[in-house]
Amino acid sequence: MRTPIRLLIAEDHALFRSSIVWMLKNLHPDIEVIGEAQNGNDLIQKAEILKPDIVLTDIQMPIMDGLTATKIIRERFPTIQVIALSLLDEPQMVKAMREAGANGYLLKHSNPEEMLKAIREVYAGGNYYVAAVVPFLY
């Protein structure tokens, strides 16, 4: 049996965050949610302690946003991969997250299968950007 993918989720909306956690814990044994964060500052602290394989982070959060947190995580913990999860499908935000070191970008209206595909692809060493934002990468 393979070791589960260790995932840390940062999302300031508790209902949305809990829904993702419930789905992963109950339906996908190859992914282990090892922690949750409500803002970027909390995310950085938990990343240092928990050492996840992947961080799934919202971009717009209080105290510290996901963009700033991604830059810090990728500088301090280069082995931790980051996937952005956002409502924003704006070219400048997609480019900014990529430049910050994000390995993927999902939109919150993506279906659950796409989120799973992104997590597994990034864990395997790849990158994953939803089709809607791919044109913004170049």
Image (tube, helix red, strand yellow):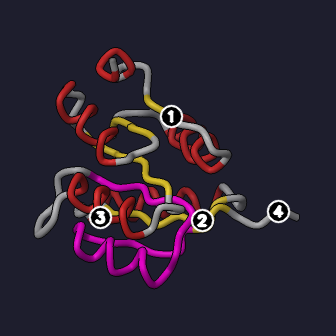
Type of amino acid at the residue the image marks with label 3:
Ile
Residue under the point 45% across and 56% down: 20
Q: Secondary structure at mark 4?
A: loop
Q: Secondary structure at mark 3?
A: helix
Quadrant assignment for the N terminus: bottom right
Residue 51 placement, left or right of 102: right
Mark 1 vs mark 4: which is more N-terminal?
A: 4
Q: Residue at x 23, y 63 (%)?
A: 12
Q: Assess disc 4: are there few (<14), some (14-19) or many (≥20) residues with their C-alpha within 10 Å of its C-alpha.
A: few
Q: Give the left or right position of residue 5, taking residue 19 as reference.
A: right
Q: Nearer the viewer, residue 125 or 120?
A: 125
Disc 4 or 2, which lies upstream in sequence? 4
Q: Which residues are magenta?
A: 33-58
Q: Amino acid at mark 2?
A: Lys
Query: Residue 109 versus residue 107: which sits nearer the camera?
Result: 107
Residue 52 lies in the magenta stretch = yes
Q: Residue furthest right?
A: 1
Residues at marks 1 and 4, CA–CA distance in whole angstroms: 22 Å
Report if residue 76 lies within the magenta region: no
Query: Which residue bears the numbered disc 2?
Result: 25
Q: Which residue is mark 3?
A: 72
Q: Is the residue 106 above or below the residue 38 in the image?
A: above
Foreground mark, 3 or 4, reads 3
Measuring from the top left, give residue 43's x and y in whole percent. 32, 71
Most foreground residue, 25 or 84: 84
Tell me the tag on residue 2. Answer: 4
Q: Position of residue 107 (x, y in %)?
A: 34, 35
